[in-house]
C-alpha cells in the first residue's frame, strides 16, 4: 500500500507542472473568453464592462459580414478538404506502388507542408498579383491576353488563389497519413483478390478503402478543423479585400477584435465557430459509423 501511494504521489508530481501550464494557458483563457462573450467589452470599456447577456451572439448572427466570412469559410473547407484527401491518397498509392526512390518522393511531396505559411502566401500573392509573374507570363511570354487579369480583386478570384494554396500545402500531409495506412494493409488480401480475378478498382473499393476507413475519418475531421482555422493565407493574400468580400471567420474575428476593438463580439464569434465545429465532427463520426454498419 505504501509503495502504491508513493507511486501515485510521484505520478502526480510529474504531471503537476504540465497540468499547471495546461490550465494556465488553455483552460483559463477558454473560461475567460466565454465569460467575455456575455459582456460589452471594447476599447472604451476596459475598466467597466457591462453584462449584456447573449447580445454579442445575436449581433454576430445578424451581421452580414459574418455571413460572408462564414460562407467563404464553408466554401474553402468544401473545396480544399476533398481535394487534399483525394490528391494525397492518389500520391500515397503511387508512392506505395513504386520500388525505388520512395524516400525522395516523400520528401518532395512533404516540402510544401514544412514551408512557412507566410512565405508561401507571399509567393502566391506575388504570382497572382495584377503586376505579378502569372500576368507577365500570359501577356509578355505567351501572349494570350493584352491586359493584366485582376486575379485578387474579386471575391472568388481571391478565394480561389487561397484555396489553391491550401490544397498545395495539404497534399503532403495527407500523403504521409495515407501512406502509413496503406502500408498497414495486409498484402495477403490483395493476393487473394488477384487470385479471384479482382481488378485494380475492385481491390481499391473492397480492400483498400475499408482497411483505411479509420484514417480517412481522422483526416476528414482534422482537415475540417483546419479549413475553419484558415487565417494566414487569406490575411496575407487578400486581407479581406475588396471590401470584406474575402474574409474568413478568423480574419473577420481578428478585424473586429484588433481593428474595431469589439472583444466581446469576437469572443462570441469564437464560441459560435467552436460549436459548429463540434457539430460537424459529431456528424462526420456518425456518417462513418453508419457506413461501417
Image: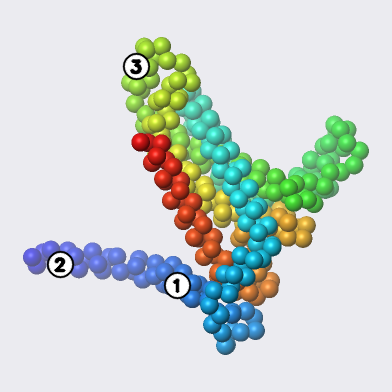
Residue at which label 2 appears? 6
Q: Where is residue 175 in the image (x, y as percent from the top left)?
A: 50, 36
Residue at 50 percent across and 60 percent down: it is: 274
- In the picture, the quarter occupied by the C terminus is top left
Residue at 53 percent across and 30 percent down: it is: 90
Q: Are marks 3 and 1 in contact (CB under 8 Å)?
A: no
Dot 2 surroundings within 10 Å: few (below 14), some, or many (20 or more)?
few
Q: Which of marks 3 and 2 is in front?
A: 3
Separation (CA) of disc 3 from disc 1 = 55 Å
Residue at which label 3 appears? 192
The answer to which of marks 3 and 1 sits earlier in the sequence is 1
Q: Can residue 249 be seen in this view?
A: yes
The answer to which of marks 3 and 2 sits earlier in the sequence is 2
Outermost residue to the bottom: 48
Residue at 47 percent across and 54 percent down: it is: 279
Of 229 and 15, nearer the camera is 229
Residue 106 located left or right of residue 119? left
Query: Which quadrant of the structure image shows residue 16?
Result: bottom left
Q: Are marks 1 and 2 in contact (CB under 8 Å)?
A: no
Q: Count all numbered tags in the image, as a single digit.
A: 3
Separation (CA) of disc 3 from disc 2 = 54 Å
Residue at 88 percent across and 36 percent down: it is: 145
Of 195 and 72, nearer the camera is 72
**Label ID, residue 31:** 1
Q: Can residue 111 be seen in this view?
A: no
Amino acid at each position: 500500500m505504501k509503495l502504491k501511494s508513493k507511486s501515485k504521489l510521484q505520478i502526480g508530481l510529474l504531471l503537476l507542472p504540465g497540468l499547471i501550464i495546461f490550465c494556465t494557458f488553455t483552460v483559463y483563457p477558454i473560461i475567460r473568453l466565454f465569460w467575455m462573450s456575455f459582456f460589452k467589452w471594447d476599447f472604451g470599456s476596459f475598466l467597466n464592462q457591462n453584462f449584456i447577456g447573449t447580445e454579442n451572439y445575436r449581433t454576430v448572427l445578424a451581421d452580414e459580414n459574418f455571413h460572408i466570412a462564414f460562407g467563404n469559410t464553408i466554401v474553402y473547407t468544401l473545396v480544399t478538404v476533398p481535394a487534399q484527401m483525394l490528391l494525397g491518397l492518389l500520391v500515397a498509392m503511387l508512392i506505395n506502388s513504386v520500388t525505388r526512390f520512395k524516400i525522395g518522393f516523400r520528401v518532395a511531396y512533404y516540402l510544401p507542408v514544412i514551408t512557412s505559411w507566410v512565405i508561401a502566401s507571399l509567393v502566391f500573392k506575388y504570382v497572382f498579383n495584377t503586376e505579378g509573374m502569372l500576368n507577365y507570363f500570359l501577356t509578355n511570354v505567351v501572349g494570350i491576353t493584352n491586359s493584366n487579369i485582376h486575379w485578387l480583386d474579386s471575391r472568388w478570384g481571391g478565394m480561389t488563389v487561397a484555396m489553391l494554396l491550401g490544397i498545395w500545402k495539404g497534399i503532403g500531409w495527407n500523403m504521409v497519413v495515407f501512406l502509413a495506412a496503406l502500408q498497414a494493409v495486409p498484402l495477403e488480401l490483395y493476393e487473394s483478390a488477384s487470385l479471384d480475378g479482382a481488378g485494380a478498382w475492385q481491390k481499391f473499393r473492397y480492400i483498400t478503402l475499408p482497411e483505411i476507413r479509420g484514417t480517412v475519418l481522422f483526416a476528414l475531421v482534422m482537415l475540417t478543423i483546419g479549413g475553419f482555422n484558415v487565417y494566414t493565407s487569406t490575411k496575407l493574400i487578400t486581407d479581406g479585400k475588396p471590401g470584406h468580400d474575402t474574409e474568413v471567420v478568423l480574419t473577420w474575428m481578428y478585424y473586429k477584435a484588433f481593428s474595431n476593438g469589439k472583444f466581446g463580439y469576437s469572443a462570441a464569434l469564437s464560441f459560435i465557430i467552436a460549436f459548429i465545429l463540434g457539430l460537424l465532427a459529431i456528424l462526420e463520426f456518425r456518417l462513418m459509423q453508419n457506413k461501417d454498419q
